[in-house]
Amino acid sequence: MEESSVASVIGGSLSAERSKTESAGNFLGNENDLRAEETEVSQLMRADEDDHEVSNNHAEETPTKEDNTMQEERRAHSNGDQEIQPASEPTSSEKSTNPAPPARPAGLGRAAPLLEPAARVVQQPRVNSSVSSMQSQQVEDSTNGETEEYDETREKLQMIRVKFLRLAHRLGQTPHNVVVAQVLYRLGLAEQLRGRNGGRVGAFSFDRASAMAEQLEAAGQEPLDFSCTIMVLGKTGVGKSATINSIFDEVKFGTDAFFLGTKKVQDVVGTVQGIKVRIIDTPGLLPSSSDQTQNEKMLRSVKQFIKKTPPDIVLYLDRLDMQSRDFSDMPLLHTITEIFGPSIWFNAIVVLTHAASAPPDGPNGTASSYDMFVTQRSHVVQQAIRQAAGDMRLMNPVSLVENHSACRTNRAGQRVLPNGQVWKPHLLLLSFASKILAEANTLLKLQDSPTGKPFPNRTRAPPLPFLLSSLLQSRPQLKLPEEQFGDGDDFDDDLDESSDSDEESEFDELPPFKRLTKAQEARLSKSQKKEYFDELEYREKLFMKKQLKEEKKRRKMMKKMASSTKGLPSDLSKDEEESGGAAAVPIPLPDYALPASFDSDNPTHRYRHLDSSHQWLVRPVLDTHGWDHDVGYEGINVERLFVVKDKIPLSFSGQVTKDKKEANVQLEAASSIKHGEGKATSLGFDMQTVGKDLAYTLRSETRFCNFRKNKATAGLSVTLLGDALSAGWKVEDKLIANKQFQLVMTGGAMTARGDVAYGGSLEAQLRDKDYPLGRSLSTLGLSVMDWHGDLAIGCNLQSQIPIGRSSNLIARVNLNNRGAGQASIRLNSSEQIQLALVGLIPLLRKLHGHLQQLSSQ
């Protein structure tokens, strides 16, 4: 718990902001991180610091209040122990003398309160306004018992804090700058959470770190051990080389307004305010879809160039004055994502050049504000990056840049944007902050990123409940072609033998019967109609029973013939297959059940096709929701059944669907091997699309019959989703008491990366004795899923009750342990057409309520 908490504090700041509710410039956390902080820090700090919202688009900001809980950390010279003393509360006069915050410039975002970099000390419970001596002794013992390793780590973390303050000082930023304050706050929070191993940990001394940084900078003798590598990406002509020249305040790369500047990957190393900076300049990319092949070659050369020395931060450049809302850059962004992986955007800053451009006119002809102009353009670029990365919660920080020589400057000669922001220190501070947090991450050993990968992908936990539900599903056993003469279960055939023998000739012994016409039925009395329809229903049921018996006999005969031909030469069977295939005639398949449409055209002819005698079954996949405005074909389905050595069936099926937004692939290969009477083993391989990844599943099941009315199944499954490997097992038992009642029980577990999900289900089915002739059917299902200690229990009940000869009443009830449920009742009839008028009741009620609302108004 502790490692994950600290990882959320530091690791979250290394990625781009993922919360939609925070401002576009905040890059030092995400929504999950803040939730983790609320859980952990509430026990350590007793504060509400997580409620503050910051924006890093301003160069600096004066705090509105001082930290009332700033602590002074002093190290004793004799034994090196720490003595933590709470600072005194500032008086009201001291609070009133604080300088007021400056007026908000017309830039990005809104002014936000400062997050205090110092964390609060855990307050000990007091009894009679004094701390008990026993508690003080416990605190002293725990402090003295800290290990030397933790002391060394804490000292190194303090030096990282001092280093960052020195960087901010050289860039002309105060410790109260919003970016500086947020970084210091997260470093202090990570130190506290990390310090829980050794007992109570005191808050770091912000004043001590700030004083040390100012002292080292004033002396100028202590070198600053820091360097940062920045990679620049962007379209051609956006000003990548010009931005690099502006950062170094000298011409490093030649620029031209009419010719391409950078033609190959190259880097330059220089110093900015005494800080070593290495910038990798890349060739300009082209946004058109036809130019993506050329972009791929350039980006692969860039990837090879940065393989040994990966960059610390990535700057994606675009122009502020290029108005585009049609996502024309999506092919380029998708190409960048494919080459470097989606994780490149998690540590990227969006840089908009030509930031001194005048805002365009608004819809009514008046000039729009600069703030609105920047916000709209930033939103377009950020939204395109979210779609390319496949994460709609991603929120990359935005920085503005102006490289024109006529740009307005301040007294120090620094270029100032129209919103009053000095862009160069702000851009460098964002880049350096990411590198500082990465060093803290490495020091605290919160992540082990693989070597050789400049942008390691974020690993996601596999969806164990989804994989377990797929594993627990019952799959029918694959059979040979000669055994697939019906869909009935073998158990049903065995159970029907005894009952069928008694009623074999019952229908043939009935006296002759002649159906009446409609006119003759109308002349019958009510009692005569009832007797007539009862007799008709009885004869129809016996006739259908006779047909079912004949079908079962035919299936058994075909099985016997297939088993008897196994000993014949293979050439004879091949000749029979060829002759049968040549004689087969393609037949038209039934029409699709298309939905109702208001269009005058009824293009049902588009969906008619023949079922050929070819062994490959190829069919289109139709989307019935859009057929009346389009052809509706979204994919293709392919199936075929093979027979290996005349004993082993092997099936292959695949379906590929593609619409305007996404593509889905589903492939399945299955086989079954019999090894004894009533024993069989099934093997299968599945590949399907899960989100943005492909899931590969290898499964195996073994079925065996314990006795005549019971069948047991045991299975294993291994799934590879992304870089996560999951394994699971299941046990299933099917008990058939008689023709009317059967019970299926299933249980299993799925594990991946030390995480385990358990689940099980129970299904009981009660049906009519003459089912499917008798339409009565009731099913009760129970399901249980336990994952991460969250127990989910679901219950569903479905019952079908026949009402008369041609009406059915179907009731469904669903309920779970969270208090959610659903109940539905459906009545269908093929004769009582007037039942459709019941559907007008909710419409009339809605209309009546609307009229009452209008009358009340």
Image: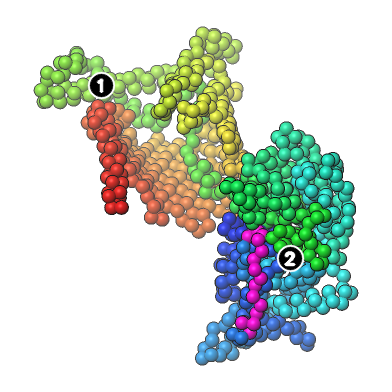
In the picture, the disc for residue 540 is 1
Q: Name the amino acid, label 1.
A: Glu
Q: Residues within 10 Å of mark 1 (few under 14, many from 20)?
A: some
As for residue 102 lying within the magenta part, the answer is: yes
Residue 561 versus residue 386 in the image, above or below:
above
Which residue carries the number 2 mark?
440
Image quarter in which the N terminus is found: bottom right
- Disc 2 on helix, strand or loop? helix
Q: Which residues are magenta?
A: 94-109
Q: Looking at the picture, tell me which residue is in the foreground, 259 or 573.
A: 259
Q: Position of residue 238 (x, y in %)?
A: 77, 46
Question: Disc 2 or disc 1, which is closer to the eye?
Answer: 2
Q: Residue at x 63, y 43 (%)?
A: 325
Q: Looking at the picture, tell me which residue is in the foreground, 812 or 329.
A: 329
Kindly tell me whether residue 793 is visible in this rendering: yes
Label 2, label 1: how far apart the Cα atoms are = 81 Å
Q: Position of residue 586 (x, y in %)?
A: 50, 13
Q: Residue at x 56, y 27 (%)?
A: 636
The picture quadrant where one finds residue 142 is bottom right
Q: Position of residue 154 (x, y in %)?
A: 73, 73
Q: Residue at x 30, y 50 (%)?
A: 853
Q: Looking at the picture, tell me which residue is in the foreground, 400 or 394.
A: 400
In the picture, the disc for residue 710 is none
Q: Position of residue 573 (x, y in %)?
A: 56, 13
- Disc 1 on helix, strand or loop? helix
Q: Name the amino acid, label 2.
A: Ala
